[in-house]
Amino acid sequence: MRTDKLKEEYKKIFEIKEGFKNQVHDIKKKNIKIQRKIDETEIQIEGMLEVLDADSGKKRDPLKVMNPKMRQKLLADKKKRERELLQKKMAAGVDFLGDNDVKISAEKGEASIFDKLGVYLSQFIEELKPFKKDVREIKANYDRSIGIFFELV
């Protein structure tokens, strides 16, 4: 008899809990709708500010005027282009650290025989360094950035 009362109390409490859960869910839906409306109005306001600034002769930063998602995408693309440019420069042998291990591919044609011999000898000595084969395997098996890291180390 006491267990029946406890079960009924549990069911009542469970129903109250489910009611609160549904209310919270409905409130979250309303908040999401309100947030979307706020975002849309912010975009409209930015567009209106752009028109006003264009009329007044002021120039605003185009990244601040556009849609925030579009702005993030443009900044991500810019960072990606900068990384790719840096990788190309590193692959071409640009000396960022002041080391002397820079590729001399452009100067080979103009160099004298002794200079060419010096370049070939330095390349041969570079091949004899320990772990060179391991670095090649890492470059072949893993991402380009990992290979560049081990090349620099």
Image (cartoon, rainbow, N blue to C red):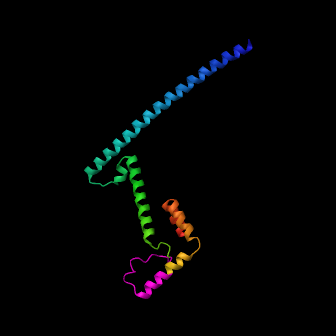
Which percent across, then down, holds residue 143?
50, 59
Corner quadrant of residue 9: top right
Horizontal side, residue 5 vs residue 51: left or right: right
Count every numbered label the image shows and give the total: 0
Q: Foreground residue, 100 or 19?
A: 100
Quadrant the C terminus occupies:
bottom right
Quadrant the N terminus occupies:
top right
Q: Which residues are magenta?
A: 99-121
Residue depicted at x 66% and y 19%: 10
102 drawn magenta:
yes
Q: Specify the farthest residue to the right.
A: 2
Which percent across, then down, holds residue 57?
26, 54
Residue depicted at x 51% and y 79%: 124
7 drawn magenta:
no
Q: Foreground residue, 89 or 73?
A: 89
Horizontal side, residue 57 vs residue 142: left or right: left
Horizontal side, residue 61 vs residue 56: left or right: right
Residue 153 visible in the shown view = no
Residue depicted at x 32% and y 45%: 47
Which percent across, then down, holds residue 82?
42, 61
Q: 19 above or below 62?
A: above
Residue depicted at x 41% and y 64%: 85
Q: Foreground residue, 106 or 66?
A: 106
Q: 130 above or below 39?
A: below
Which percent across, then down, holds residue 134?
57, 67
Residue 111 visible in the shown view = yes
The chief SS type of the magenta part is loop
